[in-house]
Image (cartoon, grey):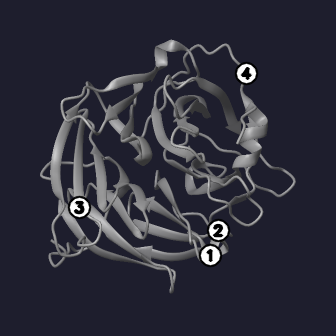
Amino acid sequence: WLAALLPLAACASAPAEYAGPVATVLPINETAPMNGEGDRADDPAIWINTADPASSLILATNKDEGLYVYALDGGELQEIPVGQVNNVDLRGNIAVASNDQFNVISWFNIDPESLTVTHIGNTPTGKEEPYGICSGLDGETYQVAVTYKDGTIQLWSANWETLESVPPHLDRTVKLSSQLEGCVFDDANGRLIVGEENAAVWTVDLSDAASKPQVLDRIADGNGLVADIEGISLWAGPGREDGYIVVSAQGADRYVVYDRAPPYAPRGVFRIADNEAIGIDGVSTTDGLDVTSAPLPGLPNGLLVVQDDANPISEYEQNFKMVDWSDVMKAIGLTE
């Protein structure tokens, strides 16, 4: 599978009723723009360099071209033209992206010494237009979930140590009613969390192949979600159930935060406004996002990275904004 390398829009709707407060946080930095017009930027993934956190990277998708790589200061480091990739995620030094130009999972290696990202191969999904993607790790097993516009979730696995020689395997397919995109694995608890764009956020029990998806929250419940439900990520605390789930409520330019642990209590809603002091505009209609709880220089509680549709003009030179997670915690009253 690695030898056969291939050559290489989200819509918003009216916000639902929400009676609670919406806190405000400010971006602390931004990536270089993806030059040009159109809905290009979509989804980021944060790679932590455990040996040198200051040299950590942000991988991000350009839906017209491929995968981009940025430094934490926002500077562009690489463009990897693998085709029209929509979402990206990673575990360890391996990243995956949903490549809907070639209907494959595109795989990448991150070299922690040279800080370069290399395309290492593709896995055909056997299904047209892979849309969302996320990755997990269960021991030595690398897990990948691919989501589709018809409500399908494919669950793939590969051996962590033999990834470059043994093809990934499709283990299970789960079906929801309508279009899916964003997802995140909760590795420690064997759960997948996935967004059904116009309806709800769901959880899937990965330990039971016969399990049915369970509702985490619905748009209709009025906790802050609206269509489109887009990016989803996990801020992992020190214990198995410590931490928070972050969801982009794209149609209302805001984000909803939930407890990581069942019953997934809503903890607050926030938006990202203009930081006039440093000349960085606020964020609108976010597609993908990623958050890490790993300490980074000047960021003891980690980093949130979100796609920004308007920079500041809609669908022109789109980029990704960075937010100090400590600011989110303070704004909506979270604890470590």
Dot 2 falls on a residue whose secondary structure is loop
Which mark identifies residue 72? 2
Q: Give the spatial CA distance, label 4 vs label 2.
A: 31 Å
- Residue at 30 percent across and 47 percent down: it is 145
Q: How far apart are marks 1 and 4 (CA)?
A: 36 Å
Question: Gap between marks 2 and 3, in whole Å?
Answer: 30 Å
What's the mark number on residue 158?
Answer: 3
- Name which of mark 1 and mark 3 comes first in the sequence: 1
Q: Position of residue 271 (x, y in %)?
A: 68, 36
Q: Do the residues labelled 1 and 4 touch (CB within 8 Å)?
A: no
Q: Residues within 10 Å of mark 4 (few under 14, many from 20)?
A: few
Q: Is residue 174 visible from the viewing direction of this image?
A: yes
Looking at the image, which is closer to me, 190 or 24?
Answer: 190
Callout 2, which amino acid? Leu
Give me the disc on residue 55.
1
Whichever of labels 1 and 2 marks the residue nearer the N terminus, that label is: 1
Q: Marks 2 and 1: in contact by CB < 8 Å? A: yes
Q: Of tags 3 and 4, which is closer to the observer? A: 3
Dot in front, 1 or 3: 3
